[in-house]
């Protein structure tokens, strides 16, 4: 087992959850969370990490000196969770994600550390995703079984889906380029790595934003009675995403850490799959039931750049390999977010700009 695990973006939604999970699963390992605390709300995770026995370091992956650390013992594993999720801001995204990953890999080379890299379903080109054949029902769009592209089926998008064939957003581009960097470091320096391409991650402690965390955003809006709109694809709210509860992700990552050698050098699509997918219309209905609040909903028919009609993860390869599957379904996931909002409302007012 690793003596020291370093988590980049360690005070963020995903990083802090992994930090807590690693402390619980590996009590004899040192866990260090490195974060620049740029995202509002990340500061709220510091007491949680401290209470669990994790160490916090204020640092920024964009600055190589912030990773020039004399840590004893040196990290044997880096969980690379740091990311700017913006889809339209190239300068910030490229510096934070691509340059940040390069600095992280240089540190991994010096420390001879393994790297578990959290990538994204955004690596797949938007034009190809929107070419997929679909049917429309009262509440959602559905993928059809017969598809024109390899790696696409009624089960969703598998690892065989093309990663070239159109734009994918600056965020997706930097994540795909970072995956390629990992391959180069593996070939040249013998770096051991693992890539998880995650769909929408959600759950308590996610400060929901339009560019990341749509399901948390939807529940937050219902809880605080904020306005919402269905945007794109006719303004009907039928676009679909699959989701993964953050606790299901941490369960998976802990299992991967325990058997890293057998996973290394591989890339997996990670998500809830068709069984854990929701349209915006369906999410609205669940949020109304759970909160008791009904909101007026606007409608904007026009699509925005990089909008995707339907994305569902085909995680069958991972499920067969890891004997893992999500255990938290839609109602439980949204209820967990609701209960977190109720319990932490006084501390969240500023972080959520209420």
Image: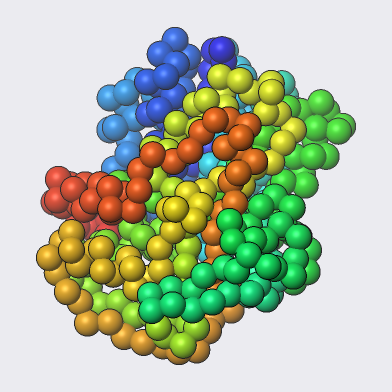
Q: Position of residue 31 (x, y in %)?
A: 46, 22
Q: Is residue 247 left or right of residue 119?
A: left
Q: Position of residue 12 (x, y in %)?
A: 42, 44
Front residue of 329/63: it is 329
Q: Residue furthest front?
A: 145
**Measured from the top left, where is residue 7 in percent x and y?**
51, 32
What residue is shown at x 58% (from left), y 46% (from top)?
A: 315
When asked about the image quadrant of residue 145, the answer is: bottom right
Residue 330: give x, y in percent of width and height.
33, 53
For the residue pair 296 and 31, the one nearer the viewer reads as: 296
Count of numbered labels shown in the rendering: 0
274 lies left or right of 91: left
**Does any portion of residue 169 appear in the rendered image?**
no
Relative to residue 34, is residue 306 depicted above or below?
Answer: below
Q: Quadrant of residue 171?
A: bottom right
> 259 or 210: which is nearer to us?
259
Q: Quadrant of the C terminus?
A: bottom left
Q: How is the image coloured?
A: rainbow
Give the residue drawn at x 44%, y 24%: 22
Q: Residue furthest top?
A: 28
Q: Residue visible at 67% across and 34% down? A: 194
Q: State the residue at coordinates (37%, 70%).
A: 280
Whether residue 180 is visible:
yes
Q: Is residue 112 left or right of residue 250?
A: right
Residue 314 in the figure: left or right of residue 54: right
Please tell me in which quadrant of the rendered image residue 258 appears.
top right
Judge whether 132 appears above or below 67 on screen.
below
Q: Quadrant of the N terminus?
A: top right
């Amino acid at each position: 087992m690793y003596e020291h695990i370093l988590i980049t973006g360690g005070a963020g939604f995903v990083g802090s959850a992994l930090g807590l999970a690693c402390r619980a699963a590996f009590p004899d390992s040192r866990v260090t969370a490195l974060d620049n605390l740029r995202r509002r709300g990340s500061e709220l995770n510091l007491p949680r990490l401290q209470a669990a026995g994790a160490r916090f370091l204020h640092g920024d992956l964009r600055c190589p000196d912030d990773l020039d650390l004399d840590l004893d013992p040196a990290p044997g594993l880096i969980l690379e969770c740091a990311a700017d999720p913006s889809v339209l801001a190239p300068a910030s995204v490229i510096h934070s994600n691509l340059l940040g990953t390069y600095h992280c890999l240089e540190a991994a080379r010096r420390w001879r550390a393994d790297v578990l890299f959290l990538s994204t379903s955004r690596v797949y080109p938007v034009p190809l995703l929107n070419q997929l054949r679909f049917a429309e029902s009262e509440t959602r769009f559905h993928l059809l079984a017969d598809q024109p592209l390899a790696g696409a089926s009624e089960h969703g998008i598998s690892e065989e889906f093309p990663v070239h064939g159109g734009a994918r957003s600056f965020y997706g581009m930097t994540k795909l380029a970072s995956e390629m960097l990992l391959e180069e470091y593996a070939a040249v320096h013998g770096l051991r790595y693992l890539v998880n391409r995650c769909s929408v991650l959600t759950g308590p402690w996610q400060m929901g934003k339009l560019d990341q965390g749509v399901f948390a955003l939807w529940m937050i809006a219902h809880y605080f009675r904020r306005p919402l709109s269905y945007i794109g694809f006719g303004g009907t709210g039928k676009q679909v995403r699959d989701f993964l509860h953050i606790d299901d992700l941490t369960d998976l990552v802990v299992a991967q850490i325990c058997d890293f050698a057998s996973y290394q050098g591989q890339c997996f699509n990670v998500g809830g799959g068709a069984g854990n997918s929701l349209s915006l219309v369906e999410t609205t209905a669940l949020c109304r039931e759970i909160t008791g609040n009904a909101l007026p909903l606007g409608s904007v028919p026009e699509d925005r750049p990089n909008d995707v009609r339907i994305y569902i993860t085909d995680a069958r390869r991972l499920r067969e390999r890891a004997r893992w599957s999500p255990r938290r379904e839609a109602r439980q996931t949204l209820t967990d977010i609701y209960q977190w909002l109720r319990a932490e409302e006084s501390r969240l007012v500023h972080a959520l700009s209420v």
